[in-house]
Image (tube, helix red, strand yellow):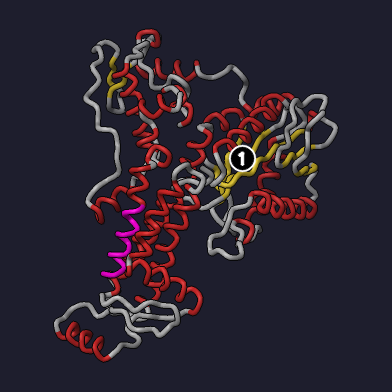
Amino acid sequence: MGRSFDNVDHKVAEAEFFLNMMWGRNSEHPQIDFLLSAYVSAARSITFALKAVLRETPGFAEWYAVREGQLRANALAKYFLELRNVMQKTGAMVVNRSASRDQLARILTRQLSGQRRTWFGESGEKGLPPAPDMEVPAAALQHFRTLLEIVYDCYVDFGPLIDPQQYYTPEHFSKIGRTIEDAEEALGYPRGWTSLGKRDTLEYIAHRFEMLRRHAAGTGGLNEIFARHLGRTTPAPAPLPPLDLPEEGWSDLPSGGRVYIPKELRKTGSAEGDIAAYIASLKTGRPEPEQIAEDSSPVKSEDFLALQKLIFSAVRKIPHTCFEVAVAGTDEPVIRERVFCYEFYHQLRVLATETGFAYSIGPELDKGGHPIIRGDVIPDFVVHQPGDMGLNLCVVEVKPLSGDADGFDKDFRTLRDFVQNYRYYRGVLLAFGNSPRAEQVIMRKTGAIRELRRIGVHVWWVRRAGEEPVELL
């Protein structure tokens, strides 16, 4: 799946936000017009996002064709679909602007009875179906719940593909031929992180998956929306009864809570000491990245800080049109990594020239046939002084948040190899794209942020055009 289902969640939350605002602006103009326009745009994007995320999923096309037929047969859904097109293309306003004689009579009755005073008028716009005889917020609410039912059905029918709470289960991992250790690694933890010893019973593994689900991103706030409007939440494994563990091995922590430490890990006489010793044992013994770079090459930390300043400045100059590319014939923009990279390289080269930056910036430098670097690897960017392996400053990989997991994995391996094996002082994974949960998206696709930081690779994320990247920890 190329894009994250977070895109759909975000649009649902956005549509509900404007819907809620409409209920608080029932008689104020032009605020109600603004909010209605924002709502119909966000609501239309829900199905756009749904199709963009799942279009390549087996069975989705047939599944969505049924829901699309239901929307076409729904008069209110059809009205809001056309309303969005009209408002986007003509700027038409449809609240309390014109009405027939019968409508005026109904409007007067509502006013005299103290009911809400926001209703649809007849806009006269070509192609717009007759306006619903409903108050604007009530019509929007009914329409929103129709769309929400479709998204909810998606969580039911495609749950394990889009919902971590349904993905991280023993049943699903058995079905896809993976293990609990694979699940731990996918979430950024060491393999065996949830193990309490050699207790590989089905009951014990189920509890380990339950522990991982508590730390995995999920429907979260969207489930609150489902509960508010539909009175139900998405499928999820039932809570398990407490795990029956021997009393021996449990320790109270000074900060509160208890921790179980298997016998083979109890070495220091205190829970804190045992935990610290276990964490230390996970290290490979390789010196920290700063130490490697300073000891093994002329490259200094100030060189990388100068590069970071250039990268951040270059990213701020990248226009919106390079983050999302408009496509003729559709209202849905596309994300093109290469478009972003070309503009990023241009801005970076201009700034490097202006500041007299001492290193060469090589875009998509093919390392095939290199006498030292093995494999046909083509990093997005290398910052170095050609011909001297001791002056390799940085390797940079760029990836949109919508990129697939295989692409993230490939970039992770490239960054790891160049830093660990080919004496590059630092690596950078530069992710871009709008998401309320960027770190979780990257963690879900690589499981590697902690590992990347440990070996000297920075993960920088820029949400939208004009903003400076932030570092993900």
How far across and how far down the image is residue 188, in percent? 48, 30
Outermost left residue: 113
Q: Quadrant of residue 19?
A: bottom left
Dot 1 crowding, Cα within 10 Å, few <14, some 14–19, many 20+: many
Q: Quadrant of residue 25?
A: bottom left
Residue name at image x 38 percent, y 67 percent? 39
Is residue 356 part of the magenta span, yes or no? no
Magenta residues, start to end? 138-150
How far across and how far down the image is residue 126, in percent? 45, 82
How far across and how far down the image is residue 300, in percent? 72, 34
**Secondary structure of residue under mark 1:** strand
Instruction: Please name the amino acid that badge 1 sits on.
Output: Leu
Horizontal side, residue 190 vs residue 195: left or right = right
Q: Which residue is mark 1?
A: 429
Residue name at image x 79 percent, y 42 percent? 359
How far across and how far down the image is residue 282, in percent? 50, 18
Q: Quadrant of residue 399?
A: top right
